[in-house]
Image (tube, helix red, strand yellow):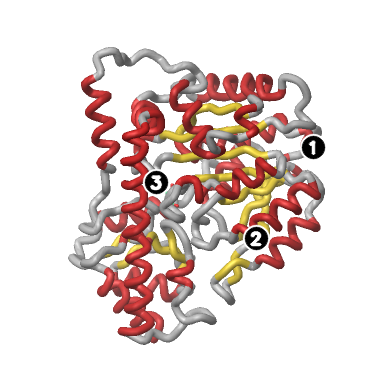
Amino acid sequence: VFATTPLNPPDAIFKLTADYKADTFDKKVNLGVGAYRDNAGKPFVLPVVRKAKILIANDETLDHEYLPIAGLPAFTSATGKLIFGEDSPALKEGRVSTIQTISGTGANHYGAAFLERFYGPWAGKTKEEKVIYVSNPTWANHKSIFNSVGCTPVDYPYYDPKTIGLNLTAFLDFLRSAPAQSVFLLHACAHNPTGVDPTREQWKEIADIFTAKGHYAFFDCAYQGFASGDLDNDAWAVRHFVEKKVPLLVCQSYAKNAGLYGERIGALNVVASHSGDVEGGAQRINSQLLLMQRSEISNPPTFGARIVSLILNDPKLFAEWKQDISSMAERIILMRKKLFDLLENKYKTPAVGPNGWSHITSQIGMFSFTGLNPQQCKDLLEKGHIYLTANGRISMAGLNESNIEYFAECVDKVVRG
Ligand code: LMR
């Protein structure tokens, strides 16, 4: 009965992790998956998370009952404040519906599924017409997720391979010429895979076009804190769009900024607008999110929600978390500087972009888009046992004091051919 089931290739990112684990070469380097590693190359349990786990283990009032369908209330209220800010008009006016999700992937899934069913401008449209514009390039899973819920991802221009930076003109032109009320996926900060973010001035221009054209902003915020080391700073674009009354939703993940990858803790926040969503908008939106959650996972898991809720709601733990985040961000920034220095000054590696290797230090967040071409990436893998995605993305977090020299030496070799 499954004779016609086609064979799907393995996931490109997770295959790298599996191949890396199976590799016995002593100098192998894993720069594939976006998961933070410490300076010894080991997975990092944040000290604040360790503390929260001890508090949970010792709390005899906690049980294993079901959470409410929307998730742990102390988590959902705190996570909204983290992204929108304590004084957010959207929160104060009761316009935000938040549900706990299976990390950022679950939030993206519900966000797109919700729009597919209820986004007014899409009423009566076919799958092909329910377009979510995504940056070219974007996290590969965005496309799979949107397709799987009956939407059609279509690229918008974003990254310019010639400058290894943002193609702002093409992006703005595209926004202007897209049909009114189009849906655009935006990376709130630390763009995956390029590490190329708009500046605040550029975000303002982008937001103005959203307002003028009535576009819908589908924000994916998987790296709050990771871009600059500062949680508020990294939420700036989202908050600006709220201020400008752009209709929007925000997906959040605590995989990276709390190191809770496997606990699958995140949230979806849908903001009802002032104008279009008439009386009771937030309540009606919320009721549909609950229905989706109930039919898909019934109610979300407790452990990650408890950890994050403790951290967000306890001022002392929150302060410690901020320190942990900046220590991760700082180590990544240090690796960027070292890599730049090695390629530029030690190896004098021929440039792959117009400004030498300066894109390594100007890019933001966990990833760097090196500018290496597919053949060079293949050579790194086959000759150097260096695992990176074929588009030239490297997870900066996989570099450390012990492997960065080897990595730079290999890059130098493949660039020189
Ligand atoms: C990545 O892009 O490497 C991470 O977001 C992990 C994933 O799920 O793909």
Q: Amino acid at mark 1?
A: Pro
Regarding residue 10, the answer to whether it shows in the image is no
Within 10 Å of disc 2 (Cα), the crowding (few <14, some 14-19, many 20+) is some
Helix, strand or loop at disc 2?
A: helix
**Nearer the observer, disc 3 or disc 2?**
2
Residue 312 percent across, percent down from the top left: 40, 32
Which residue is pictured at 36% across the width and 26% down the height? 306
Q: Amino acid at mark 3?
A: Lys
Which image quarter: residue 174?
A: bottom right
110 lies left or right of 391: right
Which residue is pictured at 62% across the width and 56% down the height? 135
Reply above or below: 111 against 13: above
23 lies left or right of 136: left
Within 10 Å of disc 3 (Cα), the crowding (few <14, some 14-19, many 20+) is some
Which residue is pictured at 64% across the width and 25% down the height? 94
- Residue bearing the label numbered 2: 202
- Residue bearing the label numbered 3: 256
Q: Is mark 3 within 8 Å of ligand 1?
A: yes
Report the number of numbered marks: 3
Q: Amino acid at mark 2?
A: Gln
Disc 1/disc 2 C-alpha distance (Å): 27 Å
Q: Is mark 2 within 8 Å of ligand 1?
A: no
Residue 121: mark in rendering: 1
